[in-house]
Image (cartoon, grey):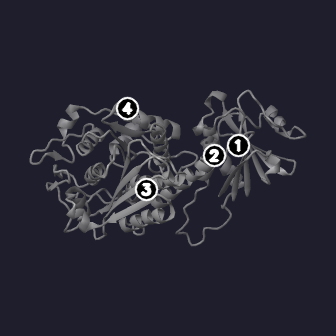
Amino acid sequence: MEVRATTEPPLQTGADTVCVGIVEGEGVAHDVADGALGALVESGEASARPRKVAVAHAEGVRWLLVGLGARDGLDAECARVAAAVAEGRARDLGARVLCWEVPHHVDDAFAAGLVEGTLLSAYRFDRFKSDPGDDDRGAESLVLSAHHDVSTPVDAAAVVATAQNAARDLQNTPSNELTPTRLGERARELADDVEGLTVEVDGRDAIVDRAMGAFAAVARGSDEEPALITMRYAPAADATGPVLGLVGKAVTFDTGGISIKPSAKMEEMKFDMSGGAAVLEAVGAIARLGLPVRVVAVIGATENMPSGHAVKPGDIVRARNGTTIEVNNTDAEGRLVLSDCLAWAVEQGAERLVDLATLTGAIVVALGSTHAGLFSNDDAWAGEVEAAAGASGELVWRLPLHAEYAEMIKGRYADIVNTTEARKASSITAAEFLKRFVGDVPWAHVDIAGTAWNLDRPYARKGGAGFGVRLLVDLARRAAAGA
């Protein structure tokens, strides 16, 4: 979808459908000549109630009156939800050029939210359908009409939302197509297309040669070649702040290995690469935006399969940093992959670390799909991640780390175990495991198992949500601003 901003009035934009937000107690800011919009509000057919949409026809165009709620709630998430609701209605009505009249007295983040909500809602994954049809194709362009120039936040929001939709494409692609090799190819495509971005992709032999025994152990069971993807972004502008390290788990299909999962909903385990997808596309967006922050990103891509070569419960493996790990459960494979990837990111110069991973089912029990879990070894860095999460609408909730939790992962036959016998604090002990591989580098772990797919928000209801792209881009903005 083409996106642009203008200071022209909506009727001069060429739009066939104009969206007008209704704020509680404020009515319509600019009514049409015959007062048709205000009349809809007066009659109660249109109201400020969030997610309510009324339709009018006047002056040769279609008007959607969209409820926004109270003035003090007009933030970026409000805009995303309103825009998604409006996009759905506009799609049903056959709109081709959609214009939002940006409400008075809102910040640039609200305008950006309108773009994000529209593009995310318009997303469809129909690549494998023989006849996707064109009845549901939606608008071809989006225009934001405002009294002042909002082109900068609008253009940036279009880049970020496009990247998030690209991550959703990766998530939704079945694992027979989206292999670790294909994920590496996507990283190379970005590097070829975006200035300042370089990529290295290493396979099984290099992973073994680098003494990444934990990562290599997970990859052993699959015939598919694993991929260690290292992305670097060096901005054209001066960047004096810390190097931002982003690490993503990308298990392109997770059977559980020898500790095999139940068959019910196993098809959803193609989504176990969601953290890697978000990291990959977020780095692309950071580079496209030209943010003045240095980034090193590491994505560990593999399948987790049972076979005669697979790692077995009770096996002991040695990670790159020398830590020995007793593998009690081969379905706790993500932390094995991440352990070597985190250590590698530190070696590559990361000075602030964030990892994204669909790591534990326990976080879904604890937080559902509203918040991702946040864990950190550094309060200041955790605060930055929380601020980025709040601004991006990709919410996190911090859970504690503690010496007693760290004690729970100590091994009987090796330094540590990858799962504990007691079913207690499972998400926390997983984070304590990862903490062993970051040294003194400020680090945050974001467990996105509950938010990565089927988010059930108006702009991302089914399938991959691309969760984490907006958060990581906002975090990069903050890192650049704090340099």
> Which of marks 3 and 1 precedes in the sequence?
1
Q: Residue most toward the bottom?
A: 130
Eye-nearest disc, 3 or 2: 2
The image shows residue 245 at horizontal and vertical percentages of: 37, 48
> Which residue is label 3 attached to?
280
The amino acid type, in three-letter code, at marker 4 is Ala
**Quadrant position of residue 330:** bottom left
* Mark 4 Cα shell of 10 Å, populated few (<14), some (14-19), many (≥20): few
The residue identified by callout 2 is: 152
For label 2, the SS is: helix
Q: Contact, CB < 8 Å: mark 1 with mark 4?
A: no
Q: Residue 149: give its label.
A: 1
State which mark lies toward you, 3 or 4: 4
Q: Earlier in the sequence, mark 1 or mark 4?
A: 1
**Who's the residue at 19% across and 50% down the image?**
321
Give residue 134's quadrant in the image.
Answer: bottom right
- Amino acid carrying label 3: it is Leu
Q: Which residue is mark 4?
A: 380
Q: Name which of mark 3 and mark 4 comes first in the sequence.
A: 3
Q: Secondary structure at mark 1?
A: loop
Vertical relation: 49 (above or below) 277:
above
Tell me the distance, in whole angstroms, between the alpha carbons under discs 3 and 2. Answer: 24 Å
Task: Tell which circle, 2 or 4, labels the residue nearer the N-terminal end.
Answer: 2
